[in-house]
Structure formats: C-alpha cells, structure tokens
Amino acid sequence: MTIAVVGAGITGLSAAWELIQNTGEVTVLEAERRAGGMIVTERRDGFVVEGGPDGFLAAELDIQDLAREVGIDDHLVDQAIKGSTLWTGRQLEALPEGRAAELLGIQWRQSVGAQHAAPLQSGFRTFASGMAQIAEALVAKLGHCIRRAQGVSGLAPAAPGWRLTTSDGSSLDAAAVVLAVPAWVAGRLLSSVAVAGAQSLGDVVYQPSITVSLAYRASQVPADLDGTGFVSAADWGGRVRACTYAWRKYPGRAPDGFALLRVFLGPVDGDPATIAHSELAQILGVRGAPLWARTFEWPRGLPRYDHHHAERVARVRDGLARLPPLAIAGAAFDGVGVSACVKSGKAAGKSVLDRLGD
C-alpha cells in the first residue's frame, strides 16, 4: 500500500524523496498543476526572475545536503557580493553585515523555538539557474509519483491506514500520510478526524507578500550602488520595504549590459509595478521606464508565529499519536525558511516510516 504525501511544495517533495528511498510506494497529491509551491523561477531572455525565495542562508545545510542527494550540489552558488544599505527617507546609509536580514525578520534556521544566535554574516546561497532548480530536480526524480490537480478534500481512517478523497471525486487508500500543506488546510483535514487542537491551526496568520522584478538597461541604473540592496526605515512613508539588486547579488541573473531589481512592497492601491518603479526613481535615481516588470502576489505568503505557536503544534502532534501513521510538516509548523521546510519534510517522512516499522 502506498504512502500519501499531500502537497508538492518543497516540503512535500522533500518528504516524498525521503520516503521513496526507503519504499517504492509513494503518491504525491498536489492541488495545483505546478509543483514547487512558493518556489517559482521564471527564465526569460537571459534573466532569472524569482517569484518566491531567491536563496537561503549559507549556514543552513539541509537544503544543501538534499541538493547533493539529487545530484545538483555542483549548481550551488554563493552571493557575488555582500553588504546592504538603509533607506532613511533621505539617503542610503551602510548597514552592518547581517543587519538588513535582521530588519527583515530573517533568523538562522527560522525554526520554531530555535535558540541559536543567527550567523547571518555567513551570507546566502542559491542555485545557478534559480531556486526552482531544486524543485525541478526533485520532480524529475519523483515524476511518476506526482499527481497534479488532485487536491485532497477528505481524510478518514481506513484499516490499515487512511482513505483520502480527492478533488476529482476519486479516492486513495494509504498506509500513512504526510500533510505538507498550509495550516488552514491541515486544520480542516485534521478536524475531520477529531485531532485535538486541529481547529486552532486555522488561527495561524499568514502575511501577504508582493514582489516586483523590474528589468532595465545597465545605463538606466546608477553604477555606484553599494551591496546587494537596501531596506527601508520603518518610519519612511513609502511603499517600498526593500529592494534586492538581483543582478549583483547572484551571478547570471541578467544578461551583460542589463540590470534586474527586485522590489518588496507593502500594501498598495494601484499597479505594483508602477509604484515600485516610481519609488525606485526617487530612491536610487533609475532613469527611464523599465524594459518590463513581473509582479508576484501571494495573498497568503509566509506564516507569522505567535507566542503560542510551538505549544499549538505540539498539541496537534500529540493528538496524531493515537491515529494511524500521519505527520504534519512545512512552514506552518517548523519554520519558514526553505531549508527548514526541507528538514521538516524529511523528518515527517522518517516519522511515518518509523511508525510503520513498529
């Protein structure tokens, strides 16, 4: 009997990879037609455009270990330059190494309850052709196991494991299940089988995200920009919260003679690309219109953990112990960083295998 993984984001793909190395019976059910979740890379005219995370902390090893396992560790690249600045509303001022990441809320391992000091000074890494490269490598390994456009609408115990009802009206019997889905989806499915505390997962707040990537000729952008980008002071009245000089941060992000800027916006009333370009003209002095712009909007982006989050997740996991093998994994539970999601997914795969072996 197969083991079912619900969700084909990086967490679910990592869980499925862990499982398939120990059992040949794995089925990944993904509601969307595309695997990878929030990891989105678009490649156009020599530009590499990220719609989700553009990299990970170099100190985080889980994703790098996974890259080695699937044979793409030679595609890992370090950021080309370091350093960042603060836009005060009047000028750009240099920031200490790692301070920009702290201002943006990036923490080492980004895991629930982590007590480690954040070695942000170690910088960031990514993949040569974009972050989607790791998801694409996993999909290539797991391709025959992945069922796209098949979300899970129901979950019920069915000896000796589970019966999952899918969005197309079919069903799948599984010996074990890994739920690698957002908190509100996990909460709904687990509530249907009376898991204690499952309803509280619906209270997890997700922060919306808007990013705009803008392409320019290099001559349109000042040549003396420092570092990998800037963050805006909290008391600045504009809508640009941060900007990455993508073509400078990592190699191969734009063709020679061109520049690629990635802007992070707060809530906007109007066209995000127009607003981003207008404020970049004020802050950086970019000249002329962009060659093109690509906007990514995530109404429910990354979860924000409150003080009770770890306790909430622990209660739910305690409730799973009385049921057939089932694990929860992902940013909703164990950390929002890409590497944290990889670690969470692989741990969930191991946990259901351990229970099946008992």
Image: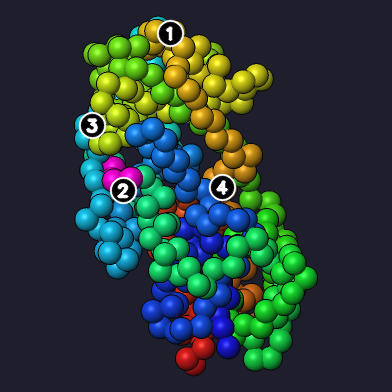
User: Which residue was labeled with disc 1?
Assistant: 288
Q: Looking at this view, is 274 or 328 the one in front?
A: 274
Find out whether residue 178 is within the magenta segment. no
Nearest to N terminus: mark 2 or mark 3:
3
**Tag of residue 303:** 4
**Residue type highlighted by circle 3:** Lys
Q: Element under label 4?
A: strand
Q: SS class of the residue under badge 1?
A: loop
Q: Are marks 1 and 3 in contact (CB under 8 Å)?
A: no
- Which residue: 69% across, 91% down? 159
Q: CA distance from mark 3 to mark 4?
A: 28 Å
N-terminal of the two: label 1 or label 3? 3
| Disc marking residue 82 | 3
Q: Is residue 85 above or below residue 32?
A: above
Left/right of residue 147 with respect to residue 194 in the rendered view: left
Q: Is residue 131 left or right of residue 251?
A: right
Q: Are marks 2 and 1 in contact (CB under 8 Å)?
A: no
Depth check, mark 1 against mark 3: the one in front is 1
Question: Around disc 4, counting alpha carbons within 10 Å, would you say few (fewer than 14), some (14 to 19), or many (20 or more)?
Answer: some
Whether tag 2 and tag 3 are in contact, CB under 8 A, the answer is no
Q: CA distance from mark 1 to mark 3?
A: 27 Å
Q: Amino acid at mark 2?
A: Phe
